[in-house]
């Protein structure tokens, strides 16, 4: 009798051959997202708080030291600007102007820079302009006030008065040789300007300031700071945003012909014809 093999159904075969599911494999194949320490929005908030605290701490440290006005002016952070000292004095800063438009812009820019630096000493400085004797200042004033909106209300003759002469003499008589500390020119270094601002505050704190009887009112105070200086690169870089904001250009009134995007405008100075005396200098001839 032959041996017979019982047939196995497909379901039985599956039941016999099917292996139990490999749960360990299924678990290890899953790659769940790693939990982050902080959400991005929370990290940004904490970063901002840290920056604010760091700036405030820096201000407290600087306030405890003898910091120069130019160093204070290097703080462009809005948080730091909110910690300015209160205004203790209102005083005048007389700006001696040149005769050409570029010179006037440069000298006014120095006044803007020094005004901000004085603010860190508790001084609110009012800029008072004084034009030169040569009549060409008039053409420059017209061009300046035509092109730059915020200069339209400025009086370019405010310190060209007899009253200013009396005030200047009274200040010299009061301070004597120390009055030179309230004079800033092109030879003054950054350290010199810092010392002038500090001395200005010192004499503003004094109680023996002279009173000057004037026939007409004057915008100039005693003591006042006298500035006859062109702005230089370091000071311009430090106060560039303030200066650019002040000299906002009036495109509608000033620009008759505008350069295209692919054009370059060159400003050439012909010293031989514009300035015959200076044009004779060998260095200028080479230029």
Image (tube, grey):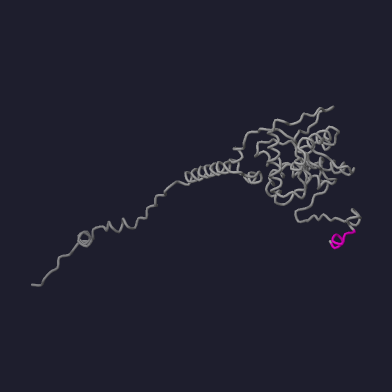
Q: Please, is residue 262 above or below residue 122 in the view?
A: below
Q: Quadrant of residue 5?
A: bottom left
- Examine the rendered structure and indicate whether residue 90 appears above or below residue 22: above
The image quadrant of residue 78 is top right
Residue 196 at what x, y percent from top left?
Answer: 71, 43
Q: Quadrant of residue 14?
A: bottom left
Dominant secondary structure of the residues highlighted in magenta in the image: helix
Position of 120 with respect to 226 (left or right) is left
Looking at the image, which is closer to me, 105 or 125? 125
Q: Residue at x 71, y 47 (%)?
A: 192
The answer to which of 164 and 32 lies nearer the viewer is 164
Seen from the viewer's position, the closer of residues 25 and 33 is 33
Q: Position of residue 125 (x, y in %)?
A: 72, 36
Residue 285 among those drawn in magenta? yes
Location of the C terminus (image quadrant) = bottom right
The residue furthest left is 1
Count the marks.
0
Relative to 114, 47 lies left or right: left
In this rendering, position of residue 222 left or right of residue 3: right
In the picture, measured across the screen, residue 135 lies left or right of residue 188, that is right
Front-lying residue, 255 or 272: 272
Q: Position of residue 63 (x, y in %)?
A: 58, 41
- Is residue 150 visible to us here? no
* Position in image of residue 36 (x %, y %): 42, 49
Is 213 part of what is drawn in magenta?
A: no
- Magenta residues, start to end: 280-286
The quadrant in which the N terminus is found is: bottom left
Residue 210 showing in the rendered view: yes
């Amino acid at each position: 009798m032959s041996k017979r093999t019982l047939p196995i159904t497909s379901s039985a075969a599956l039941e016999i051959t099917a292996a139990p599911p490999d749960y360990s494999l299924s678990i290890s194949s899953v790659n769940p997202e790693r939990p982050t320490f902080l959400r991005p929005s929370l990290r940004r908030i904490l970063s901002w708080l840290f920056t604010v605290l760091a700036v405030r701490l820096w201000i407290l440290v600087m306030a405890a030291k003898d910091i120069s006005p130019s160093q204070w002016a290097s703080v462009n952070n809005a948080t730091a600007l909110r910690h300015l000292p209160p205004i203790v004095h209102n005083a005048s800063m007389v700006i001696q102007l040149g005769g050409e438009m570029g010179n006037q812009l440069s000298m006014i820019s120095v006044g803007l820079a020094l005004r901000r630096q004085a603010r860190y000493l508790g001084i609110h400085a009012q800029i008072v302009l004084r034009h030169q004797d040569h009549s060409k200042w008039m053409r420059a004033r017209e061009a300046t006030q035509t092109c730059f909106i915020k200069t339209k209300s400025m009086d370019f003759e405010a310190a060209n008065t007899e009253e200013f002469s009396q005030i200047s003499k009274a200040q010299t008589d009061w301070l004597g040789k120390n009055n030179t500390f309230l004079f800033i020119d092109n030879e003054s270094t950054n350290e010199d300007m810092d010392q002038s601002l500090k001395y200005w505050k010192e004499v503003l704190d004094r109680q023996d300031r002279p009173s000057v009887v004037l026939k007409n009112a004057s915008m100039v105070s005693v003591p006042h700071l006298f500035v006859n200086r062109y702005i230089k690169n370091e000071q311009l870089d430090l106060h560039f945003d303030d200066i650019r904001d002040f000299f906002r250009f009036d495109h509608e009134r000033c620009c008759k012909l505008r350069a295209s995007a692919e054009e370059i405008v060159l400003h050439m100075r012909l010293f031989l014809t514009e300035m015959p005396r200076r044009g004779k200098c060998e260095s200028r001839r080479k230029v």
